[in-house]
Image (cartoon, grey):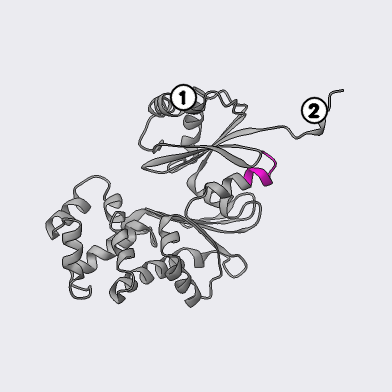
């Protein structure tokens, strides 16, 4: 007698969470992560379909080629609607999965933090982003605008406030000198890195650890509180935050969670989840939606 119908189908999926610098890959089966891998960041804004396909073919496919993958779910920075098909095409050149779906990093946050429930999903990493989610789709989004015009609460915004206060002598005594020495900087090199060199947001975000190391200093806490307060006022408070919890994913939110909660309390905003990475929530999302 064949009793195979009494047992659940073992479905294997591959989930990717891609940022500017790295991509986290997780192979999952029946709700459990069974393999992890990290590759370079993949972004259709900066890479062509051919370049993405080559990266996956050479770096990622060899790791998972024997895994009999039924579905690939790719979340990434720069995966805006007009770029989604090119990323799908690039993935399909290596993985002949039944299902290949591509989403933005903001949808990754929403799927991970809110799942099928309504809520507000926020990203605080190198950059920042946010949206109001109704359990199925984004119903409202305030544009982050990048670190020059926006990105409040992000590592880049924190770094911008930090170097601005340092160069205008607004930090507590000795902190400016400590910052410049620790990162081998001068006023001239800061100006060059911000205004002339590529990827200024990455440079500014790279200074966030200095804020964490000196978080007990009042001039540092003032910077962090201002950045988070600006994030709430200019983004979250334009959503229906009175009836929805506000959830966060990203390294900045995770490491500065205490001050983030303080800033939220001052504005009577309810904080829900704060996660460093969306990955565990994404696996749960696919279990809950019965796709895993």
Q: Nearer the viewer, residue 64 or 266?
A: 64
Residue span colored magenta: 285-292
Q: Who's the residue at 36% across and 71% down the image?
A: 226
Marks 1, 2: nearer the viewer: 2
Q: Quadrant of the N terminus?
A: top right
Q: Quadrant of residue 217?
A: bottom left
User: In the picture shown, does residue 180 fall above or below 137?
Assistant: below
Q: Who's the residue at 14% across and 54% down the image?
A: 189
| Contact check, label 1 and label 2, Cβ < 8 Å | no
User: In the picture shown, does residue 97 fall above or below 264?
Assistant: above
Q: Earlier in the sequence, mark 1 or mark 2?
A: 2
Specify whether 81 is left or right of 289.
Answer: left
Tell me where residue 142 appears, x and y as whole percent: 47, 58
Tell me where residue 268 appears, x and y as whole percent: 53, 75
Residue 46, visible in the rendered structure: yes
Residue 90, visible in the rendered structure: no
Q: Quadrant of residue 14?
A: top right
Sort mark 1 into few (<14), some (14-19) or many (20+) by Cα contacts within 10 Å: few
Sort mark 2 into few (<14), some (14-19) or many (20+) by Cα contacts within 10 Å: few
Disc 2 element: helix
**Number of residue marks:** 2
Q: Which residue is mark 2?
A: 4
Q: Which residue is mark 1?
A: 62
Residue 122 has which mark?
Answer: none
Tell me where residue 74 appears, x and y as whole percent: 52, 37
Indicate whether residue 287 is drawn in magenta.
yes
Q: Who's the residue at 26% across and 65% down the image?
A: 162
Indicate whether residue 227 is drawn in magenta.
no
User: In the picture shown, does residue 265 fall above or below 280?
Assistant: below
């Amino acid at each position: 007698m064949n009793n195979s119908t009494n047992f659940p189908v073992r479905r294997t999926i591959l989930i990717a969470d891609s940022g500017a610098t790295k991509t986290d890959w997780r192979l999952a089966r029946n709700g459990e992560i069974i393999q992890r891998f990290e590759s370079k960041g993949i972004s259709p804004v900066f890479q062509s379909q051919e370049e993405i396909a080559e990266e996956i073919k050479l770096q990622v496919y060899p790791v998972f080629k024997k895994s009999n993958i039924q579905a690939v779910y790719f979340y990434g920075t720069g995966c805006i609607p007009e770029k989604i098909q090119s990323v799908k095409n690039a993935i399909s050149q290596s993985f002949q999965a039944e299902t290949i779906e591509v989403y933005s990093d903001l949808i990754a946050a929403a799927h991970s933090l809110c799942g099928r429930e309504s809520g507000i999903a926020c990203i605080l990493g190198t950059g920042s982003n946010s949206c109001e989610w109704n359990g199925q789709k984004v119903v409202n989004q305030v544009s982050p605008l990048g670190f020059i015009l926006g990105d409040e609460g992000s590592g880049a915004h924190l770094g911008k406030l930090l170097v601005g206060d340092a160069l205008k002598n607004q930090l507590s005594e000795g902190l400016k000198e400590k910052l410049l020495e620790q990162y081998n900087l001068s006023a001239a090199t800061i100006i060059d890195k911000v205004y002339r060199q590529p990827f200024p947001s990455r440079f500014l975000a790279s200074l966030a650890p200095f804020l964490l190391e000196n978080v007990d200093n009042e001039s540092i806490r003032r910077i962090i509180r201002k950045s988070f307060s600006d994030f709430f006022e200019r983004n979250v408070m334009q959503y229906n935050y009175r009836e929805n919890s506000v959830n966060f994913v990203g390294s900045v939110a995770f490491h500065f969670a205490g001050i983030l909660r303080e800033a939220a309390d001052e504005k009577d905003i309810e904080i829900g989840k704060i996660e460093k990475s969306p990955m565990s929530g994404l696996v749960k999302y696919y279990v809950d939606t019965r796709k895993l």
